[in-house]
């Protein structure tokens, strides 16, 4: 094994930047993920790492940063800290960066975090520590395999969460990237989803359609928590219901006064979904 040096770390960063700029076509899902704002986040973090102190520990190149540092230092306030957190966790789930295990009681808390706790005594959780490696052809195959699994589960930069991963068969990635999350949380979200579907089915059966506002009122749930459920289970709901603006016929039939989106039941004819006119999302 060659000796790890700061100079070689910066060469790896430069190499990785070029690899992502010119990803081969075989990395279909990796290419799909690294577009738009997630791509901006990735390159912003690379610049941030290259400008900060790189540490060599446990035979790895590592850097440390929390969401505040990445939002204001790397991404220059382009997005809020919540978006930064989702983006960084998704990049780690893909494998572009690797979040390091930091269980203090197992003796694996990295020294930089021990010093961090001393300097910020009120801090409850450790600052995130990440490692990075060179994107070789073999490594790209590994990244594409992980990206393919995430894509198949419907994971996006907007809906990424611990619950989303666990509830769609990616518990290994969830525990790797977010080991401190509550393992009981996915079961709670699954129960809430079942309750949501009962309400949705009941309202559509009774009125022919329903809205998010009606669902929220019948669930006695906040908009924020309801939107979380819709993000996590979007594809499951989409398989059964349309969510679109009402057609003129529907507005007349149900005496609707606006073009606000409504849920209507999909009709299955000979095993195929009937395609209705109207805007869908």
Image (cartoon, grey):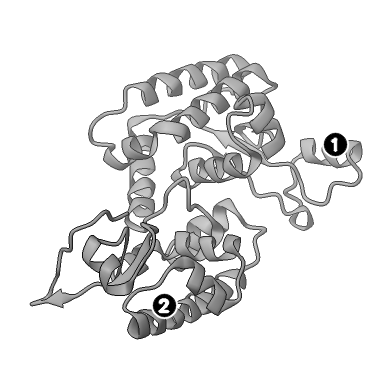
| Horizontal and vertical percent position of residue 10 | 56, 17
Q: Quadrant of residue 255?
A: bottom left
Would residue 56 be visible to someone looking at this image? no
Callout 1 environment at 10 Å: few (<14), some (14 to 19), or many (20+)? few
Residue found at x 79% / y 40%: 113
Closer to the camera, 103 or 75? 75
- Does residue 269 appear left or right of residue 183 in this picture? left
Mark 2 → mark 1, Cα distance in angstroms: 51 Å
Marker disc for residue 200: 2
- The disc placed on residue 215 is none
User: Quick one: SS at disc 1?
Assistant: helix
Frontmost residue, 133 versus 118: 118
Q: Which residue is more in the foreground, 218 or 162?
A: 218
Q: Is residue 195 left or right of residue 55?
A: left
Figure check: 251 above or below 3: below
Q: According to the image, label 1 marks what residue? A: 115
Instruction: Give x and y (percent) for residue 218.
Output: 54, 79
């Amino acid at each position: 094994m060659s000796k790890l040096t700061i100079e070689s770390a910066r060469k790896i960063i430069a190499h990785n930047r070029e690899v992502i700029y010119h990803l081969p076509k075989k990395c279909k899902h990796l290419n799909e993920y690294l577009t738009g704002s997630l791509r901006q986040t990735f390159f912003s973090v690379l610049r941030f790492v290259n400008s900060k102190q790189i540490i060599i520990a446990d035979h790895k190149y590592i850097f440390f940063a929390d969401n505040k540092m990445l939002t204001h230092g790397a991404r220059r306030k382009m997005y809020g800290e919540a978006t930064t957190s989702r983006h960084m966790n998704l990049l780690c789930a893909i494998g572009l960066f690797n979040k390091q295990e930091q269980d203090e009681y197992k003796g694996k808390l990295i020294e930089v975090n021990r010093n961090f706790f001393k300097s910020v005594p009120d801090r409850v959780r450790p600052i995130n520590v990440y490692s990075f490696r060179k994107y070789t052809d073999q490594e790209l195959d590994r990244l594409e395999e992980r990206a393919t699994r995430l894509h198949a589960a419907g994971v996006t930069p907007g809906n990424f969460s611990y619950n989303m991963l666990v509830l769609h068969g990616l518990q290994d990635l969830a525990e790797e990237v977010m080991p401190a999350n509550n393992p009981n949380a996915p079961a709670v979200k699954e129960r809430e989803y079942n309750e949501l579907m009962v309400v949705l089915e009941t309202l559509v059966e009774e009125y022919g359609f329903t809205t998010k506002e009606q669902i929220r009122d019948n669930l006695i749930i906040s908009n924020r928590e309801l939107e979380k459920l819709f993000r996590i289970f979007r594809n499951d709901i989409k398989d059964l219901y349309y969510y679109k603006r009402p057609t003129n016929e529907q507005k007349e039939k149900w005496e609707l006064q606006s073009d606000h989106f409504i849920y209507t039941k999909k009709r299955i004819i000979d095993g195929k979904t009937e395609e209705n006119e109207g805007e869908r999302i």
